[in-house]
Image: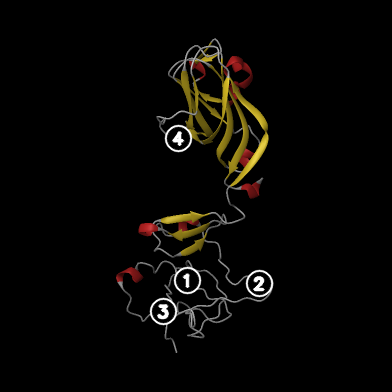
Amino acid sequence: MRDHEEDSSMTSDQSSSTTRRRLVKGGLAVGAGVPVAAVVATPAEAAAGDPVRAGLTNDAGTTGTLLTGGSSAAPTLTLTHADGRPPLILAPTADAAIPAELPTGSLAINESGDLVIGGRDATKRYVNTSRWANRTLAVAPTRILDTRAMGTYGGNVVAGAGNVLAGKLGAGKIIHVTVENVPPALAGKATAAYVNVTVAGTVSGGFLTAYSSSTARPGTSSLNWWGPNQVLSNLVEVQLGSHDGTPLSFGVYVNAATSVIVDVCGLILAEPGTY
């Protein structure tokens, strides 16, 4: 019997999913070509493309498989496993082979080990797995900018060095710096950084804004001061971007001339398993 198997006449929504295989139980689905070890209430076995066979690998290829119905007492799909064996195994699929639009509940895994799900409005979403989950990594405090010593820190400056005069970043000017010389940043593909931003030798009240080099400068401040001859600092979490092809970069803007010092004390890594 195949009480829970969809018949061969598929709706337009189901036919749009023929490029991937879906197994659904309370919102769970499995992407195309994914081996699954499973025990089902009914049917107990099926051909490729049909509901999965009990305890065996099922590869539906590009054929859509949809399980519906069931209840808590008699679920459509129940996953079980022996000790030391996972109940569900997802075979990696190249990102290019995963459709750009996935029905909500669809599930696949790419070659980087990231989980891919069908999100709102059939958009493709990524969920980092535990191996690749974002991780905050403290690093030894590393100075990447001091406008009073541009000769020492110029290697970290991506753009805006000419906006520094007499050791101060000019009023209304921006300087872009990169954290790529902080060792874990490149290996772990850092997405953000924790930086201690300091102003010194201020000439008047003002503010500083640190922001991703990939975005327009926001109308917010990261550090504020209220008069001349002040030394103030603040810990800032700043998203990293790219400036003219240089990755891992962020901009620093000041609306009043001041010396600026930037120390990196932490990184948020997208792929901590690589470092």
* Gap between marks 2 and 4 measured at Cα: 44 Å
- Picture quarter with the C terminus: top right
Sequence-first disc among 3 and 4? 3
Instruction: Check disc 1 and give the amino acid type.
Output: Gly
Q: Nearer the viewer, mark 1 or mark 2?
A: 2
Instruction: Check disc 4 and give the amino acid type.
Output: Ser
Extreme residue toward the top, this view: 166
Q: Nearer the viewer, mark 2 or mark 3?
A: 3
Question: Looking at the image, what colour scheme do you see?
Answer: secondary structure
Instruction: Check disc 3 and give the amino acid type.
Output: Gly
- Picture quarter with the N terminus: bottom left
Marks 3 and 4: CB-CB under 8 Å? no
Q: Residues within 10 Å of mark 3 (few under 14, many from 20)?
A: some
Q: Is residue 183 above or below residue 20?
A: above
Sequence-first disc among 2 and 4? 2
Q: Which residue is mark 2?
A: 85
Sequence-first disc among 1 and 4? 1
- Label number found at residue 214: 4
- Label number found at residue 196: none
Q: Which residue is mark 3?
A: 69
Question: Residue 206's spot in the image, x, y percent?
Answer: 46, 19
* Gap between marks 2 and 3 measured at Cα: 27 Å
Which residue appears at 57% of the width and 24% of the height? Answer: 233
* Gap between marks 3 and 1 measured at Cα: 23 Å
Marks 1 and 4: CB-CB under 8 Å? no
